[in-house]
Amino acid sequence: MDQHIEAQGDDRQLNVEPYWLPFTANRHFKADPSPRILVSAKGAYYRTAEGHELFDSLSGLWCCPIGHGHPRIVEALTRQAQTLDYCTAFQMSNPVTLRLAERIADMAPEGLDHVFFANSGSESVDTALKIALGYHRLRGEAGRFRMIGREKGYHGVGFGGMSVGGMVANRKMFATAMIPGVDHLRHTHDYAEMAFSKGQPEWGGHLADDLERLVALHDAATIAAVIVEPVQGSAGVIVPPVGYLQRLREICTKHGILLIFDEVITGFGRMGAPFAAQRFDVIPDMITFAKGITNGIVPMGGVIVRKDIYETFMQGPAAAVELFHGYTYSGHPLAAAVAHATLDVMEEEDLFGRVRELEGVLEGAVHDLRSETGLRDIRNIGLTAAIDLEPRPEPGARARAIFERGLREGILLRFTGDTIAMGPPFISTPDEIRRMVEMLRGLIRAER
Ligand code: PLP
């Protein structure tokens, strides 16, 4: 295993109080922070302040596919910082960002060939929603203002992404602040019909017809876009049924509604292809991305758009700004340099091919847990998998206990509610994948 660089000073003596942790039970964390302080990382492993080595079963937060401390990234970051550390994003650009836009467009499905950069998944989603509104308006269809999301969807925490998102806990505190006109497709997860499916469930393609219901209810002439994650990641790897995404595409095309794939998790190889759009052979009108593009090392996100959407904005005086939108750090050169290094490694090591090979290993290992007690479902696709635990003794309690025990036994797991999700780094070996699942088996047994 690679050497970790030792952390400086005594990281167990930290004052944790001033920090307000995101999406975290702060009081629970602060009551016993020590096992949860990470001080270094290398390859597929973290090290805690207590000296434990943890297998990174979710590639950070789905964002570090080529592992931690990669020398190519360190080198690219250093070189770029020495060359051009920041470039004014408005009215100016730089070679590394321009080349990255071209490179991403080349990887994208046919016809999606313009890239707008943001800095996170949330910003990317809000950008895509604004582009959808602007596109319809410029075409004389300003009446198309509605956005359709999906139950259990996660599209970040901006006002737009939160509104189209379908996770109840993320919405209820902000119910009065939702953008207007949003509705949601029903989700596709049905225990009775698809529990323990391997890969795409055979049942459920017809659930896409729910979009026809919403079109009938609201009138297609009021709907701007449908946004879905091809595979719902944060909800716990909810895999699209066979034919579902194809059907959504057909209905959107029929009614002139834009289809946005939020590929913040699925983009850049997690499905064994550049994008889930290619894996499932369905081409949306826009793709949002973030996370894996920079291996999680420097924040970056963006939207890839169809040529004619871009062209629709290119009207009026040539010297006039066409889209009043952008971020100080759009296309940040450090992020762009790291993105190139990440993509170089992915290409040179054929990591998408490796994901396709590891998919079978993960599928075999994770479905072998089926005989363990108290499991409701196991799902997998690409290099992702999730298990749902029976919600006992009370909702979330067992998953939390498994997570905490994992920290003592050598694995960092991701749990939300009663679901444990896995998305190991692409550089993992088959043995590491099997060991990860066997560790989980031990934890499930220990926390019956
Ligand atoms: N969209 C999807 C599909 C995501 O999974 C996430 C984060 O997990 C986001 C958007 C939000 O990304 P960020 O946390 O970078 O804002």
Image (cartoon, rainbow, N blue to C red):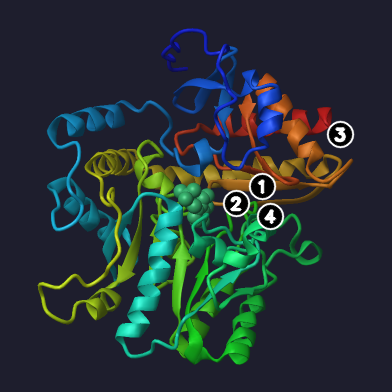
Marks 4 and 3, the one that precedes in the sequence: 4
Question: Gap in Å between the C-alphas at discs 1 and 3?
Answer: 18 Å
Question: Gap in Å between the C-alphas at discs 4 and 3?
Answer: 26 Å
The amino acid sitting under disc 1 is: Ala
The amino acid sitting under disc 2 is: Ser
Task: Identify the residue position indicated by label 1 in the image.
Answer: 386
Q: Residue at x 25, y 80 (%)?
A: 312
Q: Position of residue 153 (x, y in %)?
A: 60, 61
Residue in front for this viewpoint, 217 or 276: 217
Residue in front for this viewpoint, 392 or 66: 392
Task: Identify the residue position indicated by label 2 in the image.
Answer: 234
Local secondary structure at mark 2: loop
Q: Which residue is drawn at 15% across and 73% down?
A: 320
Of circles 1 and 4, the one toward us is: 4
Task: Identify the residue position indicated by label 4 in the image.
Answer: 169
The reply to whether the residue tagged 4 has its Cβ within 8 angstroms of ligand 1 is no
